[in-house]
């Protein structure tokens, strides 16, 4: 009864890519005043990037369910 991670490869890749992109955004752009909620700390921008990365990558996932057509 194990969890098969291969089923979620695309989402995991999106989370990793998004977290790296979020950290890079904090490092290179950031927020000088510290008043920006998302970019003031690297953790905030990494988590935000991870969520966005997962959402963007999940757009490209194939739907495996068969749709039945009824007339």
Image: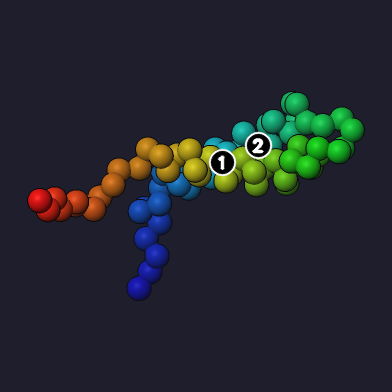
Q: According to the image, label 1 marks what residue?
A: 52
Residue extending farthest to the bottom is 1
On the image, the x and y values in percent for residue 41 come to: 79, 42
Number of dots carrying numbers: 2
The residue drawn where x is 50% and y is 44% is: 54
Q: Residues within 10 Å of mark 1 (few under 14, many from 20)?
A: some
Residue 19 can be seen, yes or no: no
Residue extending farthest to the right is 33
Looking at the image, is 45 positioned above or below residue 8?
above
On the image, the x and y values in percent for residue 29 come to: 75, 26
Give the SS element for disc 1.
Answer: helix
| Relative to 20, 42 lies left or right | right
Q: Nearer the viewer, residue 22 or 67?
A: 67
The residue drawn where x is 62% and y is 34% is: 21
| Relative to 25, 64 lies left or right | left
Q: Quadrant of residue 36?
A: top right
Q: According to the image, label 2 marks what residue?
A: 22
Looking at the image, is 67 positioned above or below residue 19?
below
Residue 6 can be seen, yes or no: yes
| Relative to 33, 7 lies left or right | left
The residue drawn where x is 74% and y is 26% is: 28
- Gap between marks 1 and 2, in whole Å? 9 Å
On the image, the x and y values in percent for residue 26 come to: 74, 34
Q: Are marks 1 and 2 in contact (CB under 8 Å)?
A: yes
Q: Quadrant of residue 2?
A: bottom left
Give the SS element for disc 2.
Answer: helix
């Amino acid at each position: 009864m194990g969890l098969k991670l291969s089923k979620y490869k695309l989402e995991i890749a999106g989370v990793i890519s998004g977290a790296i992109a979020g950290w890079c955004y904090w490092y290179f752009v950031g927020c000088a005043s510290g008043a920006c909620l998302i970019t003031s700390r690297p953790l905030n921008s990494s988590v935000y990037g991870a969520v966005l990365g997962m959402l963007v990558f999940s757009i490209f996932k194939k739907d495996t369910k068969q749709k039945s057509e009824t007339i």
